[in-house]
Amino acid sequence: MFGGLGLLVLALFHTQVIKGATYRRMSENNRIRLIRLEAPRGNIYDRSGMLLATNRPAYHVYVIPEDFNPSEIPLLSEVLKLSENDIRSHMSEVRHASFTPVLLKRDVSKEMAMRIEERRPKLGGVFIQVRPIRTYPEGELGAHVLGYIGKISRLEYEARDQSVYHLNSWIGRTGVESAYDRELRGEDGGRQLEVDARGVPIRMLQERKPRPGSDVYLSLDMKLQSKLRPILGSRRGAILLMDLKTGGLLSTLSTPGYDPNSFVTPSRNEERLELIGSRQRPLFDRGLNGLYPPGSVFKLVTAMTALETGLITRHTTFNCPGYFQLSSRSRKFQCWFDGGHGRVDLLTAIERSCNVYFYQVGRLVGPKLLASYARKLGFGSRAALEIPTAEGLVPDADWKERQHHELWFPGETISFAIGQSYLLVSPLQILRLIAAIATDGSVVEPRLLTSNGHPETVTGNVRSSAPPIGPETFRVLRQGMLRAVASDQGTAQLARVDFGKLAAKTGTAQAPPGDPHAWFGGFYPYEDPRIALVVFVERGRSGGITAAKIAKQVIQVYNELYVTSAA
């Protein structure tokens, strides 16, 4: 890609190599310069080999302050279209290491590079180098997981391994670019040059070639994710899909998104500032780091806890008159269905998402036991993913006493049981819950990276849910989730497809003062689950309408790409 120009990137080797009197003597006698050859950063691909992050050649302007005559700053300012103050400010960054090349301007045009070369006799110490600059060919697609890179700050440089990083380094800021920065950046090489009194190279003395960074392959399917993006439209939300056989995440779509090229392209500074200041928070990954009350999706945890502790069976019934009271004088906790569901058993309660049934179950279970099972299912802790994820919050009486210095009230248990109260979860945590139910508790920890670039070899860490949960409990939950989709009274019926059985649970989570959040968590196909999916729509109003309709389209896209096309 870089042709004969090579990957020449400017930065002196560390002053530990040649320093003090030795350095000055060599400089005065031979005018030796040590130039860093920066390794090209490794590429990032999706599971099918689609290129998501790579490099392109770009002209960069550098200056070695020791070789530069300050009287030429006005001329340099005119040529670079850079203020004199900016030039002085850049040079001051290395005032104690004046032989260190300073980056003045990135990614200049070929015309500007030629103008600088024409003025080299007057601009001693100023030179052009071609170096790799990061680019993201698919733009917004996968941006939250990919992340982006940025120039290292002095504080970051001083805190890092200075045999690897230098003052002109660009480092991973977020996502995979950050988590795998050392692997992606490779190993720099170097070139020793002899220069004349004006800083113009005379000859090369020796060279060590750089070792390119390692490529990274992700489990994500960007063809799939590109088809899912229009489904969310202008909504704020997330769509997560996980391969239940491997743990590989197929989609981590979060909207609104952003183009990471804004962070590596100098001409897009205004766009970058708009992204940072946007009230829509496009840089925020709602799927992996958003924390929200889960609403009725959490009823699955409440049911699981009660079944495993023997407090209920699948046949246990409660009457739903449309509300629940702890006592005749206490407040009424409403069911979402004002007329009431009548007497229902557990499967019917899951199918119709009866609040009153789970109020009763929550009262039996209590906050301590419910919190314990929730935590052991992964809520309240970060997933073992390769990039940072949100921890969430699982409340109980001890937590409230520590945090608010208040007692836990019985009414808070009632709210907790239906996924409200202080409970906060991420869409990724709900995805792990659905995966556990679909696989009889063999929770495959989600993964983003493949092994050696082959998606079929992706293997997550399989762990059994603790405490051990019996297969009958999972079977009951799956049956209730199937009915939620298949029944004409099921809350997830709008997700029904005609080519297979889908099992799911919806949620409509109150989050005043705005509209409720919409949730959908399910797995497909029912008989031999291949994927778990979560749809989350911020302020989406209804899980059974907004999220379920989106989920139907998601399953249709998945079926088109993975089932129909493979037939």
Image: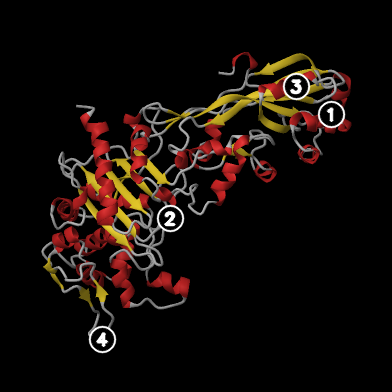
Q: Amino acid at mark 3?
A: Arg
Say if residue 386 shows up in the picture. Answer: yes
Mark closest to the chain's N terminus, 3 or 1: 1
Say if residue 465 shows up in the picture. Answer: no
Q: Residue at x 52, y 43 (%)?
A: 174
Real-space Cα separation, disc 1 to disc 2, in angstroms: 52 Å
Badge 2: few (under 14), some or many (20 or more) residues near its Cα, within 10 Å? many
**Residue 68 versus residue 390: which sits nearer the camera?**
68
Residue 345 location, quadrant: bottom left
Above/below status of 476 relative to 62? below
Q: Amino acid at mark 4?
A: Arg
Residue 261 location, quadrant: top right
Instruction: Determine which residue is flagged by label 2.
Output: 391
Q: Position of residue 199 (x, y in %)?
A: 82, 22
Real-space Cα separation, disc 3 to disc 1, in angstroms: 17 Å
Instruction: Determine which residue is flagged by label 3.
Output: 115
- Asked which secondary structure carries label 1, the reply is loop
Q: Amino acid at mark 2?
A: Glu
Q: Position of residue 461 (x, y in %)?
A: 35, 42
Disc nearest the viewer among 1 and 2: 1
**Residue 233 versus residue 243: which sits nearer the camera?**
233
Q: Contact, CB < 8 Å: mark 2 with mark 3?
A: no
- Asked which secondary structure carries label 3, the reply is helix
Real-space Cα separation, disc 4 to disc 3, in angstroms: 85 Å
Q: Position of residue 236 (x, y in %)?
A: 40, 51
**Residue 267 versus residue 285: which sits nearer the camera?**
267
Residue 68: which numbered mark, if any? 1
Disc nearest the viewer among 3 and 1: 3
- In this rendering, position of residue 192 left or right of residue 138: right
Badge 4: few (under 14), some or many (20 or more) residues near its Cα, within 10 Å? few
- Asked which secondary structure carries label 2, the reply is loop
- In this rendering, position of residue 107 left or right of residue 388: right
